[in-house]
Every structure is written in C-alpha cells, then in structure tokens.
Image: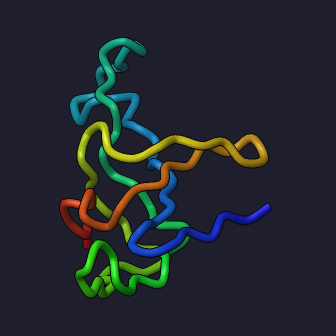
Amino acid sequence: MTIKPLADRVVIKMVEAEETTKSGIILAGSAKEKPQVAEIVAVGPGGVVEGKEITMEVKVGDKVLISKYAGTQVKVDDVEYTILRQSDILAIVE
C-alpha cells in the first residue's frame, strides 16, 4: 500500500536517533531525544489551501528538520510514517 498526501501535506519517515554520543557513551532508551530529522517519502501537489496558493518547496528524498510534536503518526505495512503540513517543516538539511 502506498500513501499519497493531499494538498500541502508530506509523508515523512523519521531518521533513527543516535544510540551513542560522539564520545562513545551508549544512551539508555529514556535518555534519547525524540528525533527531529526525517526523510521525505511523498509530497502532496500543493495548490490552494485556505485561500492561499501553496507551492511545494520540498521533494522526495530531502532530509528535513520538523517541529518536535508535529503531524499525525500512521503505520502502513509495519512501517511508521508521519503525515504533516509543509509549514511544520522547519528546514531542509543539506
């Protein structure tokens, strides 16, 4: 099954959080931060949303920073995705 977002929405898959620090310390599950970096899996067409013309500025494969608790989490074929609006994306990571 595939997910095709509508309007100004994007589907993302979270990038796994680091399990060790740069100095080599292994983090316990409770010490890990919720990851805010994700990869875009699908992009909606944009268009007119709430009376404003929306142009999609992200594309499939981009790595992005998102708001900490943005979007709606869904599970498709045992894979967790998040669907959110383009406006919840803070930056593209290059």
Residue 9, by quadrant, is: bottom left
**21 left or right, relative to 47:** left
Image location of residue 75, percent across then percent down: 66, 42
Does 23 appear above or below 82? above
Judged left or right of residue 38, residue 23 is left
- The front one of 82 and 39 is 82
Q: Viewed as shown, does residue 26 lie left or right of 83?
A: left
Residue 56 % position (x, y): 34, 83
The residue lying toward the viewer, choosing from 67 and 92, is 67
User: Residue 23, percent across and down?
Assistant: 22, 30
Question: In the rendered view, how is the structure colored?
Answer: rainbow
Q: How many marks?
A: 0
Instruction: Tell me the residue at 40%/29% (across/down).
Output: 19
Percent x, y for residue 21? Answer: 27, 30
Residue ID at (42%, 81%): 59
In the depicted structure, whether residue 49 falls above or below residue 29: below
Q: Residue at x 72, y 48 (%)?
A: 76
Quarter holding the N terminus? bottom right
User: In the image, what residue occupies the spot 78% across and 47% down?
Assistant: 77
Of the 4 image quadrants, the one containing the C terminus is bottom left
Relative to residue 57, is residue 10 drawn left or right?
A: right
Nearest to the observer: residue 39 or residue 74 = 74
